[in-house]
Amino acid sequence: MSLQLFKGRFNDDYLSQLRLNFLTTQAIMNHRSLTGHSMERMLSTSFFTSPIDPSNEQLVFEFLIQNIDTNLRHLKPKEYYEQRVVELESNLTSIDQFHMLNACRLQMEESEILKSNREYLENRCRRVIRAFYT
């Protein structure tokens, strides 16, 4: 599953797919609306547009957050890219430097989007889990 990330929002279709992927036998037994349906209906992602149970939601959000953390670890700190942009802008003499400048800008933007989405997913996870207990 490839993800398209946008700052401050997340495609709910991915959550439906992950809810299905992390579905456990216990979740099926605990969730009344799951027991009376045909297997075909139950295994369609449209059935999982809303949360099933807290443990399933926790697994979904932990998976997403861990993947974002993995991607963030592959990036250098934002300050590094900011410094490289300043250096490259002050002495832009070749097309290779221009490409490097654009690559640094893209890396800064990717880092910002990932951090924003991580924060968004953490907050959404807390809200969803809290809703099960209120």
Image (tube, rainbow, N blue to C red):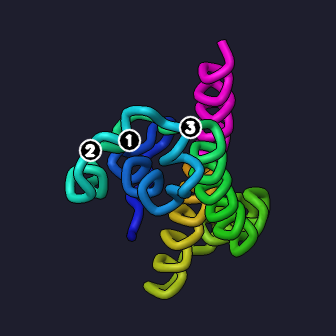
Nearer-the-camera pick, 87 or 129: 129
Question: What residue do we see at 41% from left, 62% from top?
Answer: 3
* Residue closer to the observer: 25 or 95: 25
Residue that badge 3 annotates: 53
Q: Amino acid at mark 3?
A: Asp
Tell me what residue is drawn at x 55 percent, y 49 percent. 113
Q: For this rendering, which residue is in front, 53 or 11?
A: 53
Which residue appears at 48% of the width and 76% of the height? 98
What residue would you read off at disc 1? 34
Secondary structure beneath disc 2? loop
State the SS at label 3. loop
Residue 125 counted in the magenta span:
yes
Separation of marks 2 and 1 at Cα, in angstroms: 6 Å
Label 2 Cα neighbours within 10 Å, binned few <14 / some 14-19 / many ≥20: few
Q: CB atoms at circles 2 and 1 under 8 Å apart? A: yes
Residue 9 lies, with reference to residue 2, above or below; the image says above
Residue 36 image offset from top left, x and y in percent: 30, 40
- Let me know if residue 115 appears in the view: no
Q: Identity of the amino acid at label 2? A: His
Of tags 3 and 1, the one toward the viewer is: 1
Counting other residues with Cα less than 10 Å from the Cα at mark 3, is it few (<14), some (14-19), or many (20 or more)?
Answer: some
Identify the residue position indicated by label 2 in the image.
37
Distance, label 3 to label 1, CA atoms, is: 11 Å
The amino acid sitting under disc 1 is Leu
